[in-house]
Amino acid sequence: MRLLARIKEKLLNSKSTTTELHKKKTSVFSTRTAYGKRLGLSHSEKSQLVESLTPREKEAFFILLGGYSLKETAEQLNVRYSTANTYQTAIYKKLNVNSRAELIINFRDMCETGQG
């Protein structure tokens, strides 16, 4: 019984250490707002993140920043709703946001300057 308890303890400790290292490597400084998190990114860092998007994702990104719904985005891109939803999911993941509000809070200056 003691052997099993020690093995379990070692596994739990190694998992928590791995999780902490992953959080340190992938974390981005952010602060909470009423509508989501505000990322602490400079304009050049935002530009780099936007450049990581595929050309089609960039198109969807700027349409979504313009305030269009996902249905309207799909119509403008001439794709199905599910494809536009896939683009949106990829955009959120690559830009470290979880909602349209967070996307707009963090990247509206990209739309205003027309860069990306």
Image (tube, rainbow, N blue to C red):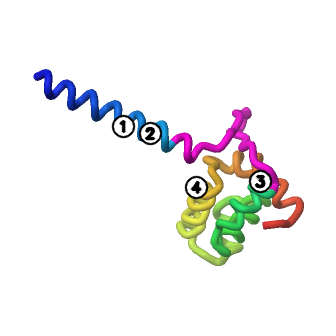
Question: Circle 1 sits on which residue?
Answer: 15
Q: CA distance from mark 3 to mark 2?
A: 29 Å
First of labels 1, 4 by sequence position: 1
Front label number (3 vs 1) = 1
What residue is drawn where x is 68% and y is 50%? 100
**Residue 70 placement, left or right of 47:** left
Quick one: which residue is furthest to the right in this view?
A: 113
Q: Quadrant of residue 14?
A: top left
Label disc, if present, on residue 19 of the rendered structure: 2
Q: Secondary structure at mark 2?
A: helix
Tell me if label 1 and label 2 are in contact, CB under 8 Å. Answer: yes
Residue 112 falls inside the magenta stretch = no
First of labels 3, 1 by sequence position: 1
What residue is drawn where x is 71% and y is 38%? 35
Q: CA distance from mark 2 to mark 4?
A: 19 Å
Q: Secondary structure at mark 4?
A: helix
Residue 27 falls inside the magenta stretch = yes
Quick one: which residue is furthest to the top in this view?
A: 2
* Image coordinates for residue 77, horizontal then vertical, percent: 67, 75
Q: CA distance from mark 3 to mark 1?
A: 34 Å
Q: Nearer the viewer, residue 34 or 6?
A: 6
Disc 2 residue type (three-letter): Thr
Question: Circle 3 sits on which residue?
Answer: 107
Disc 4 residue type (three-letter): Lys
Q: Image height check: is 2 above or below 59?
A: above
**Residue 67 placement, left or right of 11:** right
